[in-house]
Amino acid sequence: MMKNITAIKLVLLVFLLNLFSACTSTESNSSASKEDDEIATKVNDLLSQMTLEEKIAEMTQDAPANERLGIPYMKYAEALHGVWLVLDYYGNTTVYPQAIAAASTWQPDLVKEMASQTALEARTLGVTHTYSPNLDVISGDPRYGRVEESYGEDPYLVSRMGVAFIQGLQGMGEERFDKNHVIATAKHFIGYPENRRGINGGFSDMSERRLREVYLPPFEAAIKEAKVGAVMPGHQDYNGVPNHMNTWLLKDILRDELGFDGFIVSDNNDVARLGTMHFIAETRTESAILGLKAGVDMDLVIGKNEKLAAYNTKVLKDTITKNPELENYIDKATSRILKAKYQLGLFDSESKEIDTKTINAGRKEHQEFSYEMAKKAIILLKNDNNILPLDISKIKSLAVIGPNAHEEKPKKGTYSLLGGYSGLPPFYVSALDGIRAKVGDKVKINYAKGCDLLSNSKEGFPKAIAAAKKSDAVILVIGGSRKTGGEGVDRANLDLYGVQKELVKAIHKTGKPVVAVLINGRPLSINYVAENIPSILETWYLGMRSGDAIADAIFGDVNPGGKLTVSFPRSVGQVPVTYLQRPDFIGSGKGLFKDADKSPLFPFGYGLSYTTFKYSKPKFKNASISKDGSTTVSVDVTNTGKRAGDEVVQMYVRDDYASVGRYNKMLKGFERISLEPGETKTVTFTLGFNELNILNQQMKKVVEPGTFTISVGASSLEKDLHKAILTVK
């Protein structure tokens, strides 16, 4: 009898908790709805008082405050990996690892915290609207300079990182757009890297299936999960229709299908470019009308060059006056911008003088966090004979060589080894700085640049060779910089720039143990390095504390645990190279290059460790489910080495037989775990509609009955994966 009473009490308790939760949720939704209604009323009231000139003036970035009506100024900046004021480098901000490095941590929580800190610094600078994150999925073509700005080649990974970034930058729930958060802008909508030449802004011809399977998921997640406040279209056209006038993309998909309710800001000069680049509109007025009708709310013209502006009174006023129906488009755009200003609380806040002393001092805790992220981002690509980590007690001298080993503070702009879209940090720690600080007076450092990144001169080779010969080991720091990559710096060749390859060969011939440290923003075809240098660290651009993190990895204070988010090609002729492949003739040998290996030099998801890990066979909670059901798959991971280390456990899914073609496998889950020597942890992933669905012939997401191969392991390589079969009835 007592057991029954206890059970009844338990059921009642659960019921009351659920009821309380439902009420709380209802109250929260009701409160949000009430606030939205109040803002809508204020916007409509304000709009009714505005002249046509005032409305048009509001539709540009950094629109001046309207003193007559009390409409505040909304300042913009970039925030990809820290705040950058675009045309201004006054004051210092924290510079975190570049996006590609941040993604290499495979830890969305780190990206979320980075964005949250960035929002605080943005608010300190008076910034409330930022043009980040970049949600472009890299389509396997590293000739494209903006690879470094992306989170990688996989739509699921980009989605997880993008959602985390937006949630950190904007806040969620009651914190959304509060005094500690700002508006994020998801860009570039959509399919921006999908062009045939690896060129920034090149046209994108692709099927709707590829659009939806590869490029749309990050934006869908950004809107539905993170409620992103702004979206920026890409420079290019999609199947012949420029994105900035494409109503199918901007209205039918973005607003009607995905439910986006924020504002759309153009990419730089892109409304006017409907005439000057795409040659569709013959006048700027025609360009402006096309942009307005497609739903572009804000005209971004960096530098405010009036000759490039489309949303301008001189351009639009006469046409709108003659055709009053067009003012409806002006009203929609202005309303969305005013709504954002109300959401940010700008109408309620007083403008403050920027405290440059506070900015210049920086935030110590942010700088330390940047350092922690950097340590998590480093990837060990190769470590033959366990060259790494180096033992300080066994080394008397160390050569540090290479064009990327050190960088002095630039006289103008910011450091080139921070990557694109970087602010100016209060300091930058180079690899040389970090190594010197780490070893102190215990090891003699012999530094030689060897060569310049952008030069073919070998004048510095003799000094570098001499430095190597008189040292016990060599740290060779090579790669690229903002001068060889980034926006507008696309390449036709993916080899090491200049005479770096020749420098590597010369140092290798000395017979000394060599560790190659890559500092770069795109995958490179480093075949000679991969074949001949025993240890390779990929560090990307690690932010202002780069050298400290690199030194930690070299000497074992950090065990590299990062993984690649992009595949490395063996040559430019292999491009595009990505793990997202559909079935081909590989089984018959007809799908191979006649003169080269088709596989990537280093694949997606790849990364080694100073320790080793063992995986068990994946186990399902239920190995058979209904098509609307769900289950879990678990795997045990054991650290079988002698060092503590991190492993990124990855889950890939394939519908074995389906009504349409599919990729051979797609990432659908991942988790980074830390393990002590001998420790075992169980990692569990959910398998349900989100993980198992495909787009059928009608472009609808469905789960089809049949078998699914579930692969769990350390990378996308088949040899690294452990498989199990799930049946869906």
Image (spheres, rainbow, N blue to C red):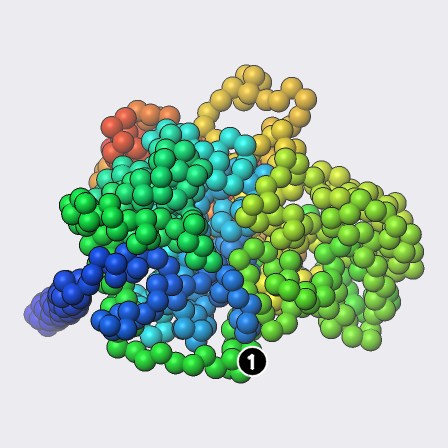
**Residue 401, horizontal then vertical, whole percent:** 80, 57
Instruction: Work out which quarter of the rendered image holds the C terminus and state it.
Output: top left
Residue at mark 1: 361
Q: Is residue 555 visible?
A: no
Q: In the figure, 327 relative to 724: above or below?
A: below
Q: Within the image, what quadrant is residue 425 found in?
A: bottom right
Residue 130 x, y percent position in the rendering? 41, 61
Quadrant of residue 211 in the image? top left
Does residue 105 appear left or right of residue 347 in this picture? Answer: right
Please tell me which residue lies in front, 102 or 683. 102
Query: Is 312 in front, or is 225?
Result: 312
Residue 82 placement (x, y as % from top left): 50, 65
Q: Secondary structure at mark 1?
A: helix
For image coordinates 55% across by 41% down, the residue present is 144
User: From the viewer's perspective, is residue 310 above or below residue 286?
Assistant: below
Quadrant where the N terminus lies?
bottom left
Q: Is residue 719 visible?
A: yes
Amino acid bearing label 1: Ala
557 shown above or below 204: below
Q: Residues within 10 Å of mark 1 (few under 14, many from 20)?
A: few
Q: Residue at x 53, y 66 (%)?
A: 88
Residue occupying the point 28% across, 43% down: 289
For residue 436, side relative to residue 304 (left or right):
right
Number of numbered discs visible in the structure rendering:
1
Q: Work out whether residue 396 or residue 45 is closer to the camera in this orientation and state it.
A: 45
The residue positioned 41% from the left and 63% from the top of the image is 76
- Where is residue 717? Give x, y as percent: 55, 38
